[in-house]
Image (cartoon, rainbow, N blue to C red):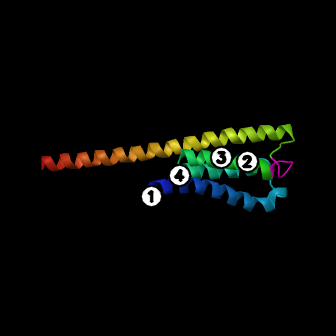
Amino acid sequence: MMQEKTKWQNYLWGVVCVAILALLLLPFRPHVNSATVALLFLIVVVFTAIYFGSRPAFVASLCGVLSFNFFFLPPFHTLRIADPQNWITFFVFLITALTVGSLSAREKHRAQEAQRLYVELQTAFEKASQAEA
């Protein structure tokens, strides 16, 4: 049961971080361009992937895309995109967020596996050294 709660908390952290970023950026909307906003949302997706895994990062990327569209692409406060150039920005952000989230989570998993293997080899080496002595 505790592990199930932890899984849901991982998803919640990603969603909450996206929401906090959107709220922090809203007052600056007239002063920042869409590329800057997209990159900041990508940072949230990367950290979500690193700390919570690929599935929470996937959810964070979807929330980031929706927030990006709703709050930062005109017409504001709709999910409609008026400018064809913003469609390109939207899809590039979506693809990048999903890819970066997946790759970040995969690399974290590889690093954990490498660390586990290192510990196992170190333990085996120490046992072999003790057996020789």
Q: Quadrant for the N terminus, please.
A: bottom left
State the SS at label 1: helix
First reached walking from the N terminus: tag 1 or tag 2: 1
First reached walking from the N terminus: tag 2 or tag 4: 4
First reached walking from the N terminus: tag 1 or tag 3: 1
- Residue shown at 51%/41% (left/top)? 106
Which is more toward the observer, 92 or 121?
92
The residue carrying pointer 1 sits among few (fewer than 14), some (14 to 19) or many (20 or more) residues within 10 Å by Cα, namely few
- Residue shown at 14%/47% (left/top)? 131
Residue at image mark 4: 52
Residues tagged 1 and 4 counted as in contact (Cβ below 8 A)? no
Residue positioned most to the left: 133
Question: What amino acid does circle 2 point to?
Answer: Leu
Q: Position of residue 74 (x, y in %)?
A: 85, 48
Question: What amino acid does circle 1 point to?
Answer: Met
State the SS at label 4: helix
Residue at image mark 2: 66
Distance from disc 1 to disc 4, alpha carbons, whole Å, reads 16 Å
First reached walking from the N terminus: tag 3 or tag 2: 3
Front: mark 1 or 3: 1
State the SS at label 2: helix
Question: What amino acid does circle 4 point to?
Answer: Phe
Q: Main secondary structure of the magenta part?
A: loop
First reached walking from the N terminus: tag 3 or tag 4: 4
Residue at image mark 3: 61
Distance from disc 2 to disc 4, alpha carbons, whole Å, reads 20 Å
User: What span is colored magenta in the figure?
Assistant: 72-78
Residue at image mark 1: 2
- Residue shown at 54%/57% (left/top)? 9
- Residue 16 in the figure: left or right of residue 25: left
Front: mark 1 or 2: 1
